[in-house]
Amino acid sequence: MNSMLRAFREEQQLSILEMSKSIGVSKSTYEKVEYGQRTPSYNFVKRFKLKYPAADTDSLFFTANYTEYV
């Protein structure tokens, strides 16, 4: 599970459906990324960054992945 992404969504006071709509991806795609079943695509991260430009996408999407390989 991507707990940082979940925490970010909850800080915005959005449901999974509302968050997925806000960034323009399907609910299923968003859920899979948040639950850690799928890595975010370039387009997913791009859409997220366009909607939330102040968000630190590196820590939301990539930090956990780097530590797994160290």
Image (cartoon, helix red, strand yellow):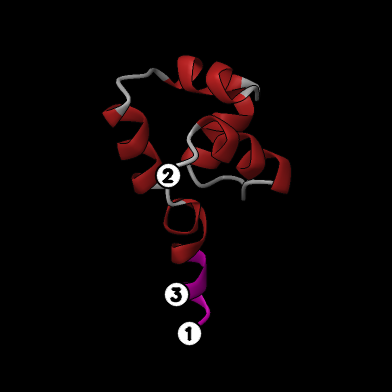
Q: Residue at x 30, y 38 (%)?
A: 7
Q: Which residue is mark 3?
A: 67
Give me the disc on residue 70.
Answer: 1
Where residue 14 sits: x, y (%)? 37, 19
Magenta part of the protein: which range?
A: 65-70
Residue 58, given in percent of the width and then of the height, sits at 49, 58
Q: Position of residue 65 (x, y in %)?
A: 51, 66
Look at the picture and state if 20 lies above or below 1. Answer: above
Residue occupied by mark 2: 55
What secondary structure do most residues of the magenta stretch adopt?
Answer: helix
Foreground of the two, 67 or 8: 8
At a point 57% along the width and 45% down the height, the residue shown is 37
Q: Tell me if residue 67 is in the magenta stretch.
A: yes
User: Neighbour class for label 2 at 10 Å: few (<14), some, many (≥20)?
Assistant: few
Residue 8: which quarter of the image? Answer: top left
- Give how far apart the Cα atoms at labels 3 and 2 are: 20 Å
